[in-house]
Each structure stands twice: as C-alpha cells, then as structure tokens.
Image (cartoon, rainbow, N blue to C red):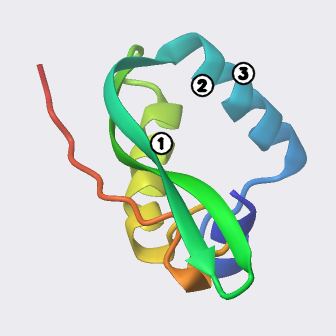
Amino acid sequence: MRVWNKFSDGRRFGKEEFLAYKKWLGKNIGVCGYRLRTRLAVMREKKAVGFMGWCAYEMKDLKSEWNKVTVMLAKYAEYSNIGGNKTAGYGVTKFALTLN
C-alpha cells in the first residue's frame, strides 16, 4: 500500500485503514493452489534467491469494499511489480480473476 499511496492521486490508505485491511485479509483470503520453484539469480558479485510460478487465492466476503481494494492492488501490482529489487526485474506479477 505504501507504493500505491505514492502513486495514487485518488484513494490513499492511512495506518488505521491498513491495519483493518490486514485483519480482513487474514480472515478472508487463503491460498487454494500454487506451483512455485526457487531460482538463483547472479547479479555481478551478488547472488539472490527468488521464486517463479503461480499462486491462486480464494476470497470470501465478495461484497466487501476490501475485496474491491484487493483486486485494485493486484491489478496495480502488474504495473508496478512488488517487493524489493523491482528495477532488476524482480516482483513481476500477472493478475487473472476467476469467478466460481
């Protein structure tokens, strides 16, 4: 959310909202499938371990405003990437919404 708050000229999230969102995530989002593998990347003298693959999440409480925020942030992650060392190509994400 920190990167979103710097980017957005619309909705921004304060500390209280962030904590409420984090609590909502813990109760309403779960991993329902994944296939991940670690990868070693060598950058000059340094080495870094990352991972590649996919992860599927299931959301409860589909009518919640936080559900919409989660989708918004997932779509934004495709644009901004996530985590550290983004400029080196880490943190690339692709978002796909599947309704059951």
Quick check: 10 left or right of 30? right
Q: Name the residue carrying label 2.
A: 25
Q: Where is residue 6 shown, x and y percent of the image?
A: 72, 77
Q: Nearest the camera: 90 or 77?
A: 90
Three-letter amino acid code of the residue under disc 3: Lys
Q: Where is residue 38 shown, x and y percent of the image?
A: 48, 45
Quick check: 45 left or right of 52? right
* Cα–Cα span, label 2 and label 3: 5 Å
Q: Name the residue carrying label 3.
A: 23
User: Mark 3 or mark 1, which is nearer the start of the sequence?
Assistant: 3
Q: Are marks 1 and 2 in contact (CB under 8 Å)?
A: yes
Q: Determine whether the residue tagged by mark 2 lies in a helix, strand or loop.
A: helix
Three-letter amino acid code of the residue under disc 2: Leu
Label 3: how many residues lie within 10 Å, few (<14), some (14-19) or many (20+)?
few
Residue at coordinates 64% horizontally, 17% vertically from top-left?
26
**Can residue 41 be seen at all in this image of the molecule?**
yes
Quarter residue 72 falls in: bottom left
Q: Are marks 2 and 3 in contact (CB under 8 Å)?
A: yes
Which residue, as the protein is rendered here, is positioned at the far right? 15
Q: Name the residue carrying label 1.
A: 70
Quarter residue 48 falls in: bottom right
Q: Where is residue 22 shown, x and y percent of the image?
A: 71, 30
Task: Indicate whether 66 appears above or below 23.
Answer: below
